[in-house]
Structures are given as structure tokens and as C-alpha cells.
Image: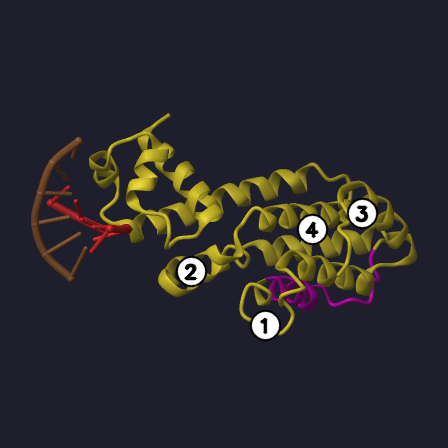
Chain colours: A yellow, B brown, C red
Amino acid sequence: MEPLEKILTASAELFSQYGFKTITMDDIARRSGISKKTLYLHFANKEEVVNESITWYKNNTTNACVAVLDSAGNPVEAMVKMLAFFDSMFKRINPMALFELERYYPAAYKSFRSMLLEKDVALMEENLKEGIKKGYYREEIDTNLLSKLRIETSIMILQPNRMVTDDHTITSVAMEIGEHFMYGIMTAKGIKLYTEYKAQYIKQTPKI
DNA sequence: TACCGA
DNA sequence: CTCGGT
């Protein structure tokens, strides 16, 4: 494994688990199995490690998303799989990490949030159109508007808001909103499929 | 690994 | 003392 790759995997793992402030350059060097000298050969400072680590994480996530979408046999299955995918992703991220990223590395935080924006609206609209064509979603829905709504709400819950509280985590709020969205667009035929896939892909955690 | 400076 | 940086 190349040193750069080692650094990025190690730092993304450490940052997501322990946050950005508590992890030191010594920690990253040690976990990467390289010297600090080599570390500074690839990065000028810690901020650069944070930024590159976020970019690397973003690319990995996008690739994983595309793989998930490709593996779905129909639009409803794709939607349920994506919900399960983001649920497991956010469960692996320490909430403090997002907080520290926003406070100490605002540029990287904005870049992380924009990950959800770029082509995801387009992918979402594609899913909605396909779902209407196959009779799973109501044909009256405005696909252009609702694809944007779906992405905007995903971003909303990452910012301070009235929904994510002590007894409602990001993942539980994301799940509830995702379900609310689905029931707003599906036909009876779609709901039948949705219920089957949900039981299959999403582990139910007890509600608080 | 040792060390400096904030 | 800790931690980014040399």
C-alpha cells in the first residue's frame, strides 16, 4: 500500500471514530505505520490532511452509492437500499466528529455537505421518473421539485436543527424523514414493494 | 527520535 | 503539559 493511501485510510478511520480535534499528527503517523517525516512529505499541515481525508471519504462514498444503485432491481429497492446505506454510514460516524469538523475545519465541512448535492439530485430525479413509469410512484408528483426536496432535507439534518436532539439521533431522524417522503410519493403497488424491502434491508431499532 | 515554540 | 511542525 502506498504511503498516501495508508495516510488517508488511517486518518479517515481515526477522524470518523474519535473526531478531528483529539486526533494528533502523531496518532495519524502511528496508525499509518509511517514516520512523521513521511507524513509531512505528503501533507503540508494537519488542515491539508483533514481536507484530503474528507475528499477521499467522499469519493469512496460516491462509489459505494453507485454500486448500491446498480445492485437494485427497481426504483423502490434502490430507495430502500440507499436509506439503509446512509443509516449504516452515519452510525459509523461519531456525532462529535461532524461538530468539530464544522467548528475547526469549515472548508472541509462545506465540502463534505456538498457531497450530497452534486449529482445526487439528478440521480434522485431519475429514480422518481423511473418509479412513476413503473407504477410505484404517483404520476402527479413534480419530480424536479421533489428530487430537490429529498436532497435538501438530507442536508438539513446535518445542520443544527430542532429535530436532532438527545433522544432523536441523526440516523433515526433520517429514517423517519425518508419514510415520510416515500409514503408521500408511492402508489399502493409501490407501498407493497416498499414494505417487503424494508423488512429485508432495514433493521428496526426500538423507537424512543 | 529528538526537539522547539505556541 | 500538549501538539503541530522541523
Q: Amino acid at mark 3?
A: Lys
Among the two numbered marks 2 and 1 on one chain, the one whose residue lies closer to the N terminus: 2
Q: Which residue is mark 2?
A: A100
Of residue A165 and residue A117, the one placed in the foreground of this image is A165
Question: Disc 1 is attached to a residue of which chain?
Answer: A
Question: Disc 2 is attached to a residue of which chain?
Answer: A
Of residue A112 and residue A13, the one placed in the foreground of this image is A13
Decide whether the magenta segment is chiefly helix, strand or loop: helix
Packing grade of label 4 (10 A; few <14, some 14-19, many >=20) is many
Residue A157 rendering spot, x and y as whole percentages: 60, 65
Is A55 on the left-hand or right-hand side of A40?
A: right
Secondary structure at badge 1 equals loop
Disc 2 from disc 1: Cα separation: 17 Å
Q: Quadrant of residue A147?
A: bottom right
Is A77 on the left-hand or right-hand side of A116?
A: right
Residue A43 vs A206, above or below: the answer is above
Closer mark to the observer between disc 4 and disc 1: 1
Question: Disc 4 is attached to a residue of which chain?
Answer: A
Closer mark to the observer between disc 1 and disc 3: 1
Q: Which residue is mark 4?
A: A83
Q: Which residue is mark 1?
A: A161
